[in-house]
Amino acid sequence: MENKTHISRWSGEFYDTRAELSYLRNSLIARDKAYGRIFLLIGFGFLFFSIPDFFNLSPGPQLGIIMVLRSIFLLFSLVLYFTMPGLKTSPFLFPLFTVYLTTGAFFSLGFTFLYGAGFDPSIHSFSVILVTFGLYHLLPQRMWIKNLLAISYGLGYVLIIAFWHETPALYTWAVAVYLVMVNIFSHYTATGINFLQRKEYLQREKLQALAVTDPLTGAFNRLKFNEVLEELFNKSRRYHQPFTSILFDIDKFKNINDTAGHLTGDEVLVKIVQAIQETKRETDFLARLGGDEFALLLPSTVEEDGVNLAQRISQSILEIPFNLGAPVTCSFGVAEYSSRDADFTSLILRADHELYLAKKRGGNCISAAAENSGEGKLDATAKY
């Protein structure tokens, strides 16, 4: 299996298909305003080419059909331009861009059929060159698809001018050679730009990851924790969805550092995070708040299920062979979001209070405050 970050020199794209499609979609979203202006320019440019039509074609069905198609494409461009902000999160954004550009290419090729005696190969060959270049540099598809569309498009044009318009053979061959050169040049430039853009994308992703990741354990840091906590809190308040927070730390961690050394202490932190990553759900969020203190945020989770997860994590930590002479244990404080929480900090304060109670009982246990009136404490303080 190819590395998701590996970029092909031939196409300038990620070898991994899902990584490439994700990049293309993120690129469209990040540059939606620029793409909107480009497509608006293409739409008006497409309409602008109707000026020679009025000189080369007499009024009739052919001119009418061409003007209708140009107007439809301009309308398509305007719709994309004005709806772009609302399409950012739409699953139709990616295919809509593809349909837009291939529609323009199809219309352009169709015009070559429609022109009769007024056909001007110089004007239309220039148009075909522009469309070919646009397919390579604007179409949000894999390079092999761009190659296939551009080559098919150029071949179709050459066949039409040769057999439909009976263009002289020398001129036809000249157009074919020019289109081959345009395809090679467009492929080369698009590949180079693709490669540099994806290298920059990977570097940016790496920097963003470093900004929100704890370098020792690989868990998220406090900055990212506060960001996700606020998002979950606002979502739960708005949609009345449950979510639970778990604060925990390692019992007597200072003793481990003092007796076994800080390198061993770092190893304990890393292995505990690895065990938790294997135990929690993919949607659960793990962060290191500092030192030996960690936090878990559990979306769409009630307090009782949070306690169950804490129990599984506690057991998985006990099974890690540290060779310290005694097992490493953790204490957990669990709290579920409540409509009575004034803000997200009040939820964390309640979880922190439960962690304090767990430590006060001697550690190696879970403390959780049931939020429903009259339930009191959940039975979650057993030793492990």
Image (cartoon, rainbow, N blue to C red):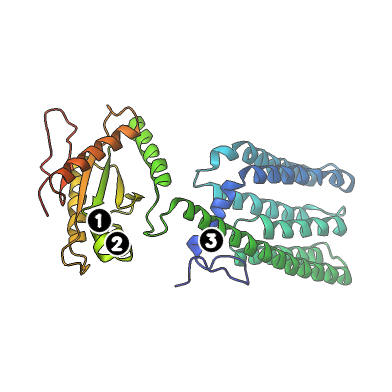
Instruction: Name which of mark 3 and mark 2 comes first in the sequence.
Output: 3
Which of 265 and 165 lies nearest the eye of the viewer?
265
Residue at image point 21% right, 41% down:
356
For label 1, the crowd category at 10 Å Cα-Cα, with few meaning under 14, some 14 to 19 and many 20 or more, is some
Confirm or deny contact between disc 1 and disc 2 (CB under 8 A): yes
- For mark 3, what is the residue? 20
Q: Is residue 142 above or below residue 213?
A: below
Q: Label 3 to label 1, Cα distance in Å?
A: 44 Å
Q: Secondary structure at mark 3?
A: helix
The residue carrying mark 1 is 253
Q: Which badge, 1 or 2, is on the more N-terminal residue?
A: 1
- In the image, what residue type sits under mark 2? Gly
Residue in view at x 55 percent, y 65 percent: 14
Front position in the image: 298 or 27: 298
Q: Pointers 3 and 2 in contact (CB under 8 A)? A: no
Q: Callout 3, which amino acid?
A: Glu
The answer to whether mark 3 and mark 1 are in CB contact below 8 A is no
Picture coordinates of residue 69 (x, y %)?
71, 45
Q: Amino acid at mark 1?
A: Phe
Name the image quarter holding the N terminus.
Answer: bottom left
Q: Residues within 10 Å of mark 3 (few under 14, many from 20)?
A: some
Give the percent coordinates (x, y) of residue 73: 69, 44
Q: Quadrant of residue 256?
A: bottom left
The CA span between labels 1 and 2 is 8 Å
Residue pointed to by mark 2: 265
Q: CA distance from mark 3 to mark 2?
A: 40 Å
* Quadrant in which residue 116 is drawn: bottom right
- Compare marks 3 and 1 and give the one earlier in the sequence: 3
